[in-house]
Amino acid sequence: MQGIEADGAPIGLVDRVEDDRIKLVKSASGEGHHEGHHHYIRGDLVADIEDDVVRLSADADVAVLNEEEEDGRPLN
């Protein structure tokens, strides 16, 4: 499924849901030390799921601040 922020910006492809969090595919992980591993977004940021799109309730500037590592640590 495609992940879309509230402002319409793509966040990447959703791999699956794990423990009330969205797990993004590795290719959506960014650059540098964030590259090549999964990032997660809290499930409470999901506003809607329709067809093959997961839409978040947060805009890009807020959503990126809520991305987490596998162990729950914030990315930033």
Image (cartoon, rainbow, N blue to C red):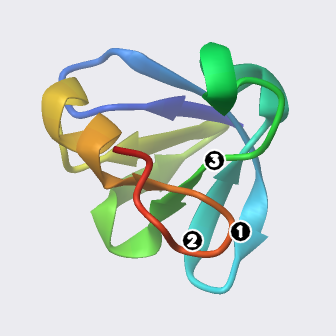
Q: Mark 1: which amino acid?
A: Val
Q: Secondary structure beneath disc 2?
A: strand
Is any atom of residue 29 visible in this view? Answer: no
Q: Furthest-bottom residue in view?
A: 19
Q: Position of residue 27 (x, y in %)?
A: 79, 21
Q: Position of residue 20 (x, y in %)?
A: 56, 82
Q: Rounded to the nearest whole Å, what is the CA distance between mark 3 and mark 1?
A: 12 Å
Relative to 71, is 45 above or below? above
Residue pointed to by mark 1:
17
Query: Across the whole image, how many numbered discs are drawn on residues?
Result: 3
Determine contact: label 1, label 2, CB under 8 Å: yes
Choose top left, top right, bottom left or bottom right for residue 71.
bottom right
Q: Position of residue 24 (x, y in %)?
A: 69, 43
Residue pointed to by mark 3:
39
* Residue that appears at 79% across and 37% down: 25
Judge depth for marks 3 and 1 and give the one in front: 3
Q: Secondary structure beneath disc 3?
A: loop
Q: Any mark on residue 21, and which?
A: 2
Choose top left, top right, bottom left or bottom right for residue 55.
top left
Q: Rounded to the nearest whole Å, what is the CA distance between mark 2 and mark 3?
A: 10 Å
Query: Where does the N terminus fall, quadrant-wise?
Result: top right
* Residue that appears at 33% across and 74% down: 44
* Residue that appears at 53% across and 34% down: 3
Q: Mark 2: which amino acid?
A: Arg
Query: Where does the C terminus fall, quadrant-wise?
Result: top left
Q: Any mark on residue 56, and which?
A: none
Judge depth for marks 2 and 3 and give the one in front: 3
* Residue that appears at 18% across and 44% down: 58
Q: Mark 3: which amino acid?
A: His
